[in-house]
Image: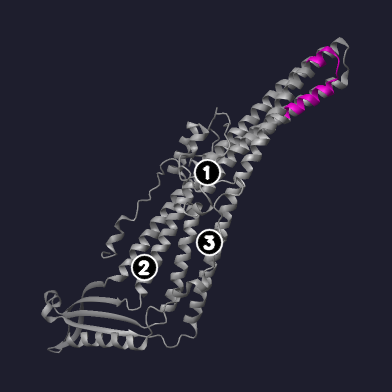
Amino acid sequence: MKNSFLLLGTAVLAACAAIPDASERYIDNRNALFSTVADAPGEWSASGVAGQAPSADWLSQFNDPQMTALVAEALAANPTLEARAALTRAAQARARAARGQRWPSLSASVSGGSTSTGVIIGGEEKQIQNSVYSANLDASWEADLWGRVSNSVAQADADRAASEADLAAAELSITAQTAGAWIALNEALAQERIAGLSFEARDRVLTITDRRVRSGISGPLELRTARSQLAAAEATIAARRQFSAEATRRLEVLLGRYPGAELTSTTDLPELELIKAEGNPALLLTRRPDVAALEARVVSAGLAAEEARLAMLPALRLSAAASGGASTFEDAVDPALIAARMIAGLTQPLFAGGRLRAQQAAAIAQAEAAVANYAGGVLNAWREVEDALTADVLLAQQEAAQSVAFEEAKFAEDLAERQYVSGTITIFDLIDAQTRRLNAESQFVSARAGRATNRISYHLALGGGVPVSPATDTQPDADAEEDGRSQ
């Protein structure tokens, strides 16, 4: 045992003499590698103002309890979110496993068997059975001379942080997708109702035209035209019903339900106030979970590059083994009969055909890619908020203008219908007025739905948080402090 400790001390001294100061690491030169993101202004350029951090309860502005309930259901049952949560638990487990590298590993094995030997006794061959038992105990540990083990643990923690941020981003995305799918469904149902009202209007025109033809006021051309318009309105209803069913199925899939197009809604599209700018470009970087994930991957990539450099340094490993063999099990496990040995070894890569250098170059390139991805992700996040702020103003103008157009078109349709009954205009004038009313109402619904969808995109871009409690099984890494000391 004394000789073993002497060997261990000699190995450490030799390594310290042969290797430069361990503080001279690759990531100490990170400033030469990591690029910087574009400077962030103090306020959003689309609004010219900056505000406080946005509230997580952003669904309340839609004043729609059913939307909130559906979001909660999606967070509890969406398969994609469940898969993301499982991946996060796997990353947490890998981080705990990495911490186990700091501690010695210990394994034990026991085996037993028998051998048969042929001997000649009294001129007759006989088989003699001999029992053989053995017990083995092995232990090994790597000294963290240059921070190789600590670096590996830190990289696993960075990967875990990235996975947890991915989960938070997935929860926010599912929230936005569900709310957006609900708006899309209500828009489709509103368009279906408009198509039904248009069918009723065309049917009234056909009834009026038929009476006019019977009275000799109108001719077959007007009657055929009225019938054609009624058939076209019926076809539009079928198309709108198809869109409604498809929108329902998309929402049901998000909810983890069978897509049977059974979900119903009587909710009107929300009437929203103008967006109040929240946060600022710099604050956004601390809120967006996808940006946090990119940042964690930058850290992980830098640590991977450092690990590739450390792979070229000596590794000090201490191993110990104890074994024993006997003809009886009691003797095999008798400590007095077990042979023990302890070995300290210092290994230094000498020649690997350039493999280690190439791996280091690849790791550095991966780190550069991670930084570039981070910069691109940040720029895209800023663009999404600026787009949503600008779009809200323009969509509000569209909604207001379409509302006026719809009201005027509705009055014009009523007037045209009375004039057609009195015989002062033709059926073509009436159909033209009805078509303008139909298009104006449809475009008004689309503008209102587009504004609601943009509002959801705005809060998604802000990283505004999940407004209801997620139900995914993603408990914090509470047992991280166990440091992998057990199996």
Check disc 2 and report the residue beneath it: 153
Q: Which mark is residue 374?
A: 3
Dominant SS type (magenta): helix
Q: Is residue 242 visible?
A: no
Q: Which mark is residue 433?
A: none
Of the two numbered discs 1 and 3 on the same chain, state the one appearing first in sequence. Answer: 1
Q: Secondary structure at mark 1?
A: helix
Instruction: Report if residue 140 lies within the magenta region.
Output: no
Q: CA distance from mark 1 to mark 3?
A: 23 Å
| Residue 236 position in % (x across, y down) | 71, 31
Foreground pick, 210 / 165: 165
Alpha-carbon neighbours of circle 3 within 10 Å: few (<14), some, or many (≥20)? many
Quarter assignment of residue 378: bottom right
Q: Is residue 197 visible?
A: yes
Q: CA distance from mark 1 to mark 2?
A: 35 Å
Residue 81 lies left or right of residue 481; in this view the side is: right
